[in-house]
Image (cartoon, rainbow, N blue to C red):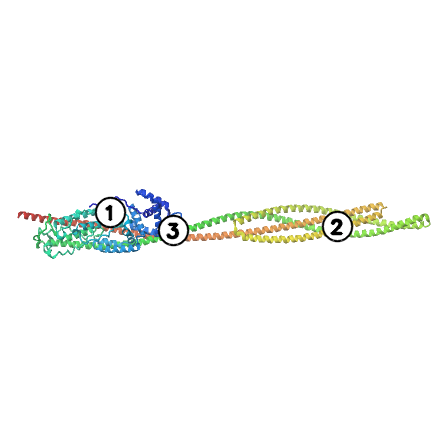
Amino acid sequence: MVSTRSGKSTKHTYAERVLNAYSQAQREHRRQSLHVATLRAQVRKTAQERKDKLGPNWASWVGKAVRKLEEQGVLEPIDSSGYVRMTEEGKKALNAARRRVLGSSAGHKPTPEEEDLLWRSVSHHFSPSSNISRASRRYSDVRSSRKRRRSGRSGPVSRAGGGMTEDERDSEASFAPQRTTPVSKRRRTTTIDPFALPTPSKPLSRMNKTELKAKVKELQSVLFASRTGTPHDDTQLSNTEREHLRKQLHEARVELDVYRRRTAIFGAEDEELTDVEDYGLPSSLPGPLPSPIRDARTPPTPSPARRGSHMLLRTESGSVIHGVSKQPTPAPSDEGRLDMGAGQEMEYTADEGDMAQVADALAYDRQEWAITEGGQVITPDMTPSVHEEPDVGATRALQEKLASLERLLADKDQRLAGLQSDLARKDEVLGEKEKAIDQLQHMLASKDDTITQLRDAVATKDVAIADKDSVLSQKDGELSKTHVTLVEIEGKLRDQATQLEDKDNIINALRAEVDSLRSVKEVLESQVTAVGNEARAKQEAIEKMRQDHAKAKELLLGAETELNATRDRLRDTEKHKEHVEGLYREVLQTLSEMEQTIQRREVSLGEKDKQITDKDTAIAELEGNVQSIAEELKDAKFSVNDLIVRLKASETQKVEVETELRATIDTVRREKDDSVVAISVLRTEKATVDTQNEELHGQVAVLTSNLREARAEYAAAKKMVLDLLGTVDTARSARDEEVGKSAAAKQALRVAQTEAARLREQVHEAEMEIQQVRGELAVNRAALVAEQTTTSMLRSDLKTARGELDDARKKLEATGKEVIDTRANVKRVEEEAEELRVAKMADENTIADLKTLYERLKRVQAEWASEVDQKFMSVQSKSIQEKTRRALEI
């Protein structure tokens, strides 16, 4: 029967398609998270590449498969945008399935069939119907029991399979749902359970046709299980070796069948046997036929009824005496001997059952009955005689050789089991190292994340510090500019202070002069009072003179009236007239004296007028100086206002840019409030000074009113004097001049007083403006001090920020050292893993060398078996020819 391959393509579930699409899209896009639309596009692309037809609603089925995988825990959604990624459990299952299907070789590129098997394993691992927890234990128990049952007939194969890891057992258990899935939902597949059929304990020669068919199916299932279970097992042979072994096995089977047909004698229980070649055993079976290995050292005991007629006879040397020819077989030549030294290395592989089958066939043929070429059953008369015992000795020698070979094979089997256990242990150590490497890589990734976070924080700190540095540089520039301007203003203020000191000196001098003028004024006022008193006295004298003049008039009238009446009294009147003239002379003398005093007073008033004009000029100069000072003060006010505007702008900028300066601004505001309170106090003081000035002005007004009253009284007195001295023009003119001079003096005094008052007001205003400028200068100095404190605070903040940056850099350096140490540990672990890989490769090379030695041993055994068969054939042909010759002679 020739093995055929089904033309139907393997159907894939949508879960397998989605997992395959996720892997390919992740390799293409190099991302951990993928969108569902990307998975749909990759599923369609993969189906087009494989020429696989998708259904009309494949997109919805892909979405359902994604949701099903999310429910099973293979995938997890990132957010509501449709992106998914593989969970940690899914990654673990994928890594376990990849090690199980693809092996531990890193450079192996999987085939499409292996990828299909990989994703099928992962999907069945997470399938709800798999029942991993129960089925895996049940399947492992069944498999272990079947391994124990097969250990007697498969030899080192079962022992080699004992080195399988727990992950492989669990992964093989994941295929159990293929048998537990209901028939209606089972996918069409060519996989056959390798353990479904019972293993026969009979050899192939005793099986009938149905048993042989069942055996062939069992071997095909074993072949398929070996192909799908471990496609890259270290014990798997290449295709050329497999074909070579198949040819050898086929030739051995043909020779054994020919030998059996020629030499064996079949009983009644084997009449239903059909030849194996008629059934057509497939040549694609790579493994051995699982026939039980019988001990060649103890040949089977024939039945008592046929013990004497069917036992092989041997000579004393051990050569077999054929039952027909009655001749011993010749001894083997020295060339055919096998040198089975102690230093020869051999190894069992998956095909050692061929030699076991050959040994089984030989051992079984030694107890079978011989037949002729035509198939005629030999009668008891053809029983070999006692002289054929050398054949039995040769058979025993062959049995001893077989036993020695089996012992050597057992030793090699033990060595192979030890090597495989060492290899499994190294695989476990390598897996632990890989896990440690993964953990270290995760640690490195976390360290890299922390380093990137620290670097981002340092970058943000650097940006913030750079911004603060730029702001501070700007503020420093502005402060330097303001400092320069303040220095200039301070210089100007110093100059103005010196000028103000000069002006203060001038004002003090002016004040001294004003005080002297006040003293002079007081003196003048005293003199005016004295003059007033004198004028009053003179007015009283004038009034007396008026009275006297009236009396004189009355007397003159009386005299004129009496002049005509009496002339006698003329002498009395003339005497009275002389007396009056004397009085008049006295009055003239007093008037002349008064004129002299008035002239002296006029001279003194002229001098005083000159002094007042000099004072007026000095006051005019002072007014010019005061105006220039006022203009300079106005300029200083404008500059101070500009500075105030700039400071306010800088303060607003500071308020907008730096909220941290609010405390200092509050202090500045409190100082400003204090300055406002001080200004208010100064204003109250100014108000008090103004009230004092107003009181002084009232006093001056009272004085001026008194002066006016005095002037009025003086004018009245002057008028009275002019009335009294109306007859005397000179006296009147002199009196008029005196009155004019006194009025001019009084007017000049009034003007001097007004000018002095005005000068006092200007001086007071200048003092107030100077005080105001000094207050504003103090405020500016306080603002400058606040700005300097703010700058110092900003510099301290900058120092703290730089300290924090240095701490962050130190932490970064420490983290970098930890990363370097971690990388060194990773490198050390990788070196250990590499050493383990090298040791594993050395062990694999040793195993490969043992395989080659075993192949050599198999070839030697095959040659030996062929030589033995040839000798048997030659002996049989000779005996048959001798027999036929004798029969013809008879």
Badge 2 crowding class, 10 Å Cα cut-off, few under 14, some 14 to 19, many 20 or more, is some
Q: Position of residue 872 (x, y in %)?
A: 12, 50
Kind of residue indicated by mark 1: Ser
Front in this rendered view, residue 73 or 359: 73
Amino acid type at circle 2 is Thr
Residue 2 visible within the image:
yes
Q: Residue 704 carries which label?
A: 2
The tag earlier along the polypeptide, 2 or 3, is: 3
Q: For numbered disc 1, what is the local secondary structure?
A: loop
What residue is pinned by disc 3? 445
Residue at 44% of width from left, 49% of height from top? Answer: 456
In the image, which disc is placed on residue 238? Answer: 1
Q: Can residue 419 be seen in this view?
A: no
Q: Earlier in the sequence, mark 3 or mark 1?
A: 1
Marks 2/1: CA–CA distance: 143 Å
Position of 125 with respect to 449 (left or right) is: left
